[in-house]
Image: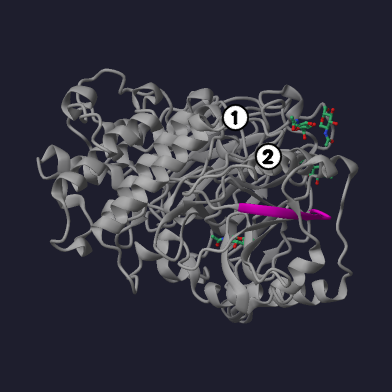
Amino acid sequence: MFLKLVFMLFFHVTLVASEDNSFIYNGFQSSHLYLDGFAELTSDGILRLTNDTEQVIGHAFYPNPIVFKNTSSESVSSFSTTFVFAIIPQYPPFTGHGIVFVLSPTKGLPNSLPNQYLGLFNDSNNGNSGNHVFGVELDTSKDFEFGDVDNNHDGININDLKSVVSTTAAYYDDHGQIRTVDLSSGNPIQVWIDYDGVKKKIDVTLAPVYVVKPTGPSLSMTKDLSPILNNSMYVGFSSSTGLLAASHYILGWSFKVNGQAQNLVISQFPYKKKSKISTVGLPLIFLSLVFMITLGVIYYIKRKKFSEILEDWEQEYGPHRFKFKDLYFATKGFREKGLLGVGGFGRVYKGVMPSSKLEVAVKRVSHESRQGMREFVSEIVSIGRLRHRNLVQLYGYCRRKSELLLVYDYMPNGSLDNYLYNQPKVRLSWSQRFRIIKGVASAVVYLHEEWEKVVIHRDIKASNVLLDSEFNARLGDFGLSRLYDHGADPHTTHLVGTFGYLAPDHIRTGKATKFSDVFSFGAFLLEVVCGRRPIGRVGENESLVLVDHVFECLKRGEILEAKDVYLGTNYVSEEVELVLKLGLMCSHSEPLARPSMRQVVQYLERDLPLPDLSLLSLSSYGLTFGHQELVEDKTVPYTSVSIAESVLSGGR
Ligand SMILES: *[C@@H]1O[C@H](CO)[C@@H](O)[C@H](O)[C@H]1NC(C)=O
Ligand SMILES: *[C@@H]1O[C@H](CO)[C@@H](O)[C@H](O)[C@H]1NC(C)=O
Ligand SMILES: *[C@@H]1O[C@H](CO)[C@@H](O)[C@H](O)[C@H]1NC(C)=O
Ligand SMILES: *[C@@H]1O[C@H](CO)[C@@H](O)[C@H](O)[C@H]1NC(C)=O
């Protein structure tokens, strides 16, 4: 006994019973779990189902099947499990989407979707009785589609994301008082799930780890699981993130068929404090990984011939089709020194064209689907004909296997975000900022209304605004997100854009419109004036939603307080006020209540007086909004209906 204890203490050992009807993990070092998606074991032995990446899933399953009944006619045996989890949102308190304990006939849940689908099902097999899936969800988002009670609940799911029963996450304390548990507080929470095979009853109990198992369950249901479970099943966890992401962790887990799951030994868990769980050492590992991958890529490129793809249909297009070889030499082989940035769509390198000495920026966009690529290239090529002094000029492109290279005008002063946050070395004056704002506005009007086709930008934000040698704004990256949109089911996955800039209507319908561009433009206005991101961390557990902050200032009658402190006193207060108010108008949750880009320009040029914001937005007209993945109980309460509130309730 003593020896075993010592052994366990030293190795956080995983004891697996000889027969696969029970197991216990007090930490996951050297466990042989089946993992897929974003699930991984951290170096200190914590099971992480997802990290902060948006719209991904993670699965972890005990590797061997567990026998729940020997013959199909038999009824399912009793089983019991307990585990400890923690959810750390990327931007507290906004989080998504949760963890499900799951019994599945297959190892993994193929073709399942992230977001509200929790990595369990997709929109075609959800609710299908042939799924044979039993789950207990710890759901941190409220999805109307599945009739969720709130954004912090546990529920029992049978073949369906719509829970059979569910309740706000809570437990009964010693005095019989109900206490709610914040699932995404980042603190470890223990869950017990017990199925009584004789009474056909499922009990779910949860409480913070420091609380002993409460005597009564917080959720229970009488249901014979025999028709639902197959003879042998895989047990595990599924998790997903949405536009709001969180790291979902499992710290320890015990399971048993025909008996009580062994107690977890929390003291053996490999976590110390919250901060430990998050990211000690990760940046370093990640950096070296990036470095190694980069080395690998360079090596690969050096080795590979300058192969590219040219199809007949491409000949007919106007803009320049570059030779890969030329781009290779222009960028000196895409060397690291010439790396200008890494964006959502790929890496950007500086180059000088050998013959013309023209300075260019070369963006390498990798893409798997040949089909999407074909449509995209024709689109890019037509976009290459766009001409506007505030758009980054696309000179041409080059196409290789699963890769597209886009050649743009080089912008010596880089992207605007570098001058706004994180203690920039150079700060922009008000007149520079105002000129940038007007420039971007006129570029968007051109895209929306003045060119031969309507072009929706889809990703307007400071980091997509580049600055030329005189700090004139040039909007870049238009249409790129199209590439990732092709063929995606709009209301499920692959929403492209950047959280904080995405309009609620865009999120809801998956469709980018002129209105959703205006919304992003509004977020952009506020970030330029305030020198803050649309949503960002302030302190460990708090986030600042910029539009709320500006709105609060407006309500107090001190809207100028929202401006960037680094503007000093050298600004025109009428202009600052105008831009802030315009930013709020553009952030309206109701697409039709937002101004058009043409109107935006007229307001900025003062050709049109700004309407009275209190009339437009503070009446309750049009401000309630139906979509809610939101966290009502965790956000700052607002007393009146406000733009900010509606943006919030719509925006996630
Ligand atoms: C999440 O994990 C993936 C793969 O494991 C990694 O590529 C990515 O950089 C991670 N993202 C964050 C935000 O940690
Ligand atoms: C299946 O049969 C074996 C051998 O008879 C028995 O030990 C085991 O408990 C049974 N399993 C279940 C789930 O009933
Ligand atoms: C689960 O059981 C059902 C019905 O008995 C059967 O159709 C299905 O193939 C089984 N699934 C697996 C993966 O064995
Ligand atoms: C949904 O998942 C099922 C089961 O894996 C799969 O057969 C089906 O093709 C998927 N449907 C879609 C639309 O992905």
Check disc 1 and give the amino acid type: Lys
Circles 1 and 2: CB distance less than 8 Å?
Answer: yes
Residue drawn at 54 percent across, 35 percent down: 456
In x, y percent, where is residue 33? 71, 59
The image's colouring method is one colour
Which residue position holds label 2?
A: 382
Say which label, 1 or 2, has the lower sequence index. 2
Q: Is residue 396 magenta?
A: yes
The amino acid type of the residue labelled 2 equals Ser
Q: Is residue 276 left or right of residue 452?
A: left
As drawn, the residue found furthest toward the left would be 557
| Location of mark 1 (residue) | 453
What is the chief secondary structure element of the magenta stretch? strand
Q: Residue 298 is drawn in which quadrant? A: bottom right
Look at the picture and state if 640 lies above or below 307. above
- Mark-to-mark CA distance, 1 and 2: 10 Å
| Magenta span | 394-402
Q: Residue at x 48, y 24 (%)?
A: 144
- Residue at disc 1, secondary structure: loop
> Is the N terminus in the top left, top right, bottom left or bottom right quadrant?
bottom right
Residue 14 picture quarter: bottom right
Q: Is residue 297 above or below residue 618?
A: below
